[in-house]
Structure formats: C-alpha cells, structure tokens
Amino acid sequence: MKVAANPGRYKYSARNLARLQIWQASARQPLPGVALKTAIFAVDTRSKLQIRMKDSSALHIKTYIFILLMVLFAPLGNILLGKGMKSIGSAKDWAPQDLFSIFVRVLSSGYIWLGIACLLAFFVAYMLVLTWADYSYVQPASAFSYAVVAILGYFLLGEQVNLLRWTGIAVICVGVFIVGHTHPRTTEKT
C-alpha cells in the first residue's frame, strides 16, 4: 500500500509515514485524503509534544519558581490578614453602627491591604502555573506552604508550635519532596 505525500504543502517524516502505513494495513482500509493528512498531522504533533514534555528543564525551573511564589505569598497574605484583623478586634454585638465601624477600620488597615496584595499575587501565580503544569502536581507541591505557615506563625504572631505539629509538617514536606521529583506535566496540551 502506498501513501501519497504532497511534499510542497505538507512535510512528513519517514517514521510518521511508516506508522501511518502500519495503521492503515491493520485497519485493512485506506484512509481518504483529508483523513490521511489529519492522521499524519496528529501523529507528528503528538511525537513533537512527547519530545518536548520529556526534556524540558526550563519547564521545571519555571514551575519551581512559581510554586515558590505561591508557597510564600499565600501564607504571608493569610498571616497579614490575621494580624490586621486581630488588631481591629471583634464586634461585641452585631449592631449596624459597630459593623460599620469595623468595616472602616478594616479598609484603613495597612496589614489587611498588604495581605490582600499578597493573596492576589498568590492567585496570579497559581493561575499561571496551572496553565502549563498538572493540577495533581501543583496542589501537592504547594502544600509546602504548611511549613511556611508554622514558621511565620511562630515568628510574626508569637504562636507556639509543638512537636506533634512539627512532625506532621515534616511528613507533609516529605510528600512534597516526593511529588517534586515527578514531571510537572503528564498530559498533552490541547
């Protein structure tokens, strides 16, 4: 069986043409011309994506940088929001004038605005990293933020972190280390 290639319009590699010929022979029916071009394009595109996915140290570095930003900005934003809200105090009752007073103090707190800015930076980094890395990689890898939360809570908020909590955080960090040694993208880009 012969596969006709149009060298002027499409460029087919010999390997992809051989794959298609084997596929056609196993199907025992020739493909129409349009389906032939589509099948060759799909085979060629898939092989290019697999090569790109296997050897991409730039993808690893870019992913690590953005996960590091996520791991830093999310806990820092939450700590700053917590510190800001603790300095404002709570409502004694739910009277409208008390709620309005708290709302004004919230909007005038520098800690709260810094916390919001950090959480926005986290959100942008999170959205960007999800455009090229798998969710099943990003979410576990970002769990390293639990260690950052404990450290920031201890130093900035004066919280006591007992040995049992540190042990749990260490177990989580070991899991993050294991996930970090896998490839960030296992699916093809659509």
Image (cartoon, helix red, strand yellow):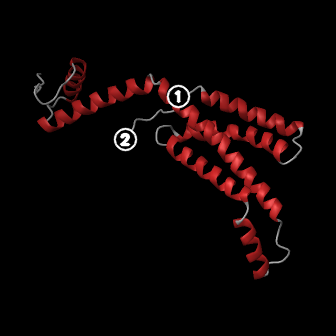
Relative to 138, 30 lies left or right = left
On-image quarter of the C terminus: top left
Relative vertical location of residue 20 with respect to residue 103 in this rendering, above or below: above
The numbered dot on residue 60 is 1
Q: Give the number of the mark in front: 1 or 2.
A: 1
Label 1 element class? helix
Q: Quadrant of residue 95?
A: bottom right
Residue at the outermost top position: 14
The numbered dot on residue 175 is none
Give amino acid for label 1.
Answer: His
Label 2 element class? loop
* Residue placed under numbered mark 2 in the picture: 190
Question: Which residue is depicted at the point 79% across and 55% down?
Answer: 83
On-image quarter of the N terminus: top left
Disc 2 packing (10 Å; few <14; some 14–19; many ≥20): few
Relative vertical location of residue 63 with respect to residue 22 in this rendering, above or below: below
- The reply to whether the C-beta atoms of the residues labelled 1 and 2 are less than 8 Å apart is no
Q: Nearer the viewer, residue 128 or 178?
A: 128
Give amino acid for label 2.
Answer: Thr
Disc 1 packing (10 Å; few <14; some 14–19; many ≥20): some
Q: Quadrant of residue 4?
A: top left
Q: Where's residue 35, x and y in %? A: 18, 37
Relative vertical location of residue 131 with respect to residue 36 in this rendering, above or below: below
Q: Where's residue 105, x and y in %? A: 75, 68
Q: Earlier in the sequence, mark 1 or mark 2?
A: 1
Numbered disc total: 2
Q: Where's residue 169, x and y in %? A: 77, 36
Relative to 14, 70 lies left or right = right
Question: Which residue is depicted at the point 14% across and 31% down?
Answer: 30
Question: Which residue is depicted at the point 68% across and 32% down?
Answer: 175
